[in-house]
Amino acid sequence: MKVLFVVPHNIVHETDMIIGLKHKGVDARVVAGILREPDASKLAAAGIALEHIPFASRIDRNAVRKLRGVLSAFKPDIVHAFNNKTVSNGLLACKGMPVKFIAYRGIVGNVSFLNPGSWMTYLNPRVNRIVCVAEAIREYLLNIGFLWLRIPPHKLVTIHKGHDLAWYQAAPHNLAEFGISENDFVVGCITNYRPRKGIEKIVEAASMLPRELNVHFLLIGNMQNTGLARLLARSSARDRIHLAGFRADAPRLQAACDACILPSLKREGLPKSIIEGMAYGLPAIVTDSGGSPELVEHGVSGLIVPPASAQAIAAAVTELRSNPQRCEQMGAAARKRIEEYFSIGVTIDKTFSLYRELILERNQDGA
């Protein structure tokens, strides 16, 4: 089977998945909006052609024209697109061509039968399957509708984005640059500030923790927000909340922490930062939002708390801090859970099975 992958940028997950699918017999070709190393070289070394086509907007006529040229030359059986721009432009480029189309969806929300943009992407009748990165996304899409309009259930497939523990071997960073000592308990959070991420709840929770627990929070990513800055300035725990900003060595910072957290309020997909933290052997604290609870077994590999509850976050942190042995056991269980249930091998196998199903459909359609 021949599959054209249309990705916004080549990153390690997509790269290793595509290479793994090639090893299973898929004739693969990649179009990427942004080319990145070392993944571009890895694809080339695996004998997979990679072409650079930037996607400036959801309707980029120049990109559509170039992509249609690739389609005409390669003649794929399946086109697999990975975000809004690649889905909408990919569908336009495929018009009139006998290909099956897969759209990837990585977040809960923002799809509506009343939104014209949704008809350009996930609600387009020419989309044959929507690969949902979490079951929460599949359930959300299954339940949206308008009058009699619904997404046919057979179109929605949950395939968790798999990872490989070998990707997470970075040596822990020395956190002394933030004034954190080896005796402190550090909770790491990797994300960029958005209102729905609930970062304010971390600040509130930090003020509830007794100082003698020596708990520090390390916020990694762009946290530039006026309201958040004011809240931090007023916080009694501001000396224990550290803004690392964007860091190219974020995995090393995460590896140096004792636990990881993502206090999302809503619309979470399958958060990569939590997967990374768990892969490094950190117990995770997540909210019952979107796909986060699919990653964590409560009380086994981490703790699940209600969204928007600073009190629950403070209690969870206290529980981990107060019982070092249990914290360590949860961290080991977290790493094992990623290895067994969220591995790249499982993702490759499920994706390959989906391709075979679509090829069979296409053959039946032709008959």
Image (cartoon, rainbow, N blue to C red):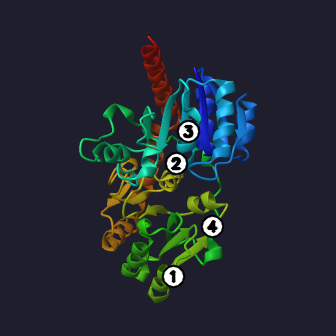
User: Percent x, y for residue 337?
Assistant: 43, 43
In the displayed structure, 347 sits above or below 255; it is above
Which amino acid, mark 4?
A: Phe
Q: Residue sitting at 44 percent across and 22 percent down? A: 357
The amino acid type of the residue labelled 3 equals: Leu
Q: Which mark is residue 84?
A: 2
Give residue 108's position: percent from left, percent from top.
Answer: 39, 52
Q: CA distance from mark 3 to mark 4?
A: 36 Å
- Do tag 1 and tag 2 residues touch (Cβ < 8 Å)? no
Residue 107 visible in the picture: no
Q: Earlier in the sequence, mark 1 or mark 2?
A: 2
Which is more toward the observer, 174 or 206?
206
- Check contact, mark 2 vs mark 4: CB within 8 A: no
Dot label at residue 92: 3
- What kind of residue is marked 1? Thr
When asked about the image quadrant of residue 207, the answer is bottom left
Query: Camera-side residue: 93 or 16?
Result: 93
Disc 1 vs disc 4: which is toward the camera? 1
Residue 66 versus residue 244 in the image, above or below? above
Q: Is residue 140 above or below residue 360?
A: below
Q: Residue drawn 39% across and 64% down?
A: 320
Tell me if label 3 and label 4 are in contact, CB under 8 Å.
no
Q: CA distance from mark 1 to mark 4?
A: 17 Å
Image depth: mark 2 or mark 3 in front: 3
Q: Is residue 344 above or below residue 218?
A: above
- Dot 1 alpha-carbon crowd within 10 angstroms: few under 14, some 14 to 19, many 20 or more: few
The answer to whether one can see residue 297 in this image is yes
The C terminus: image quadrant = top left
Q: Mark 1 — residue?
A: 226
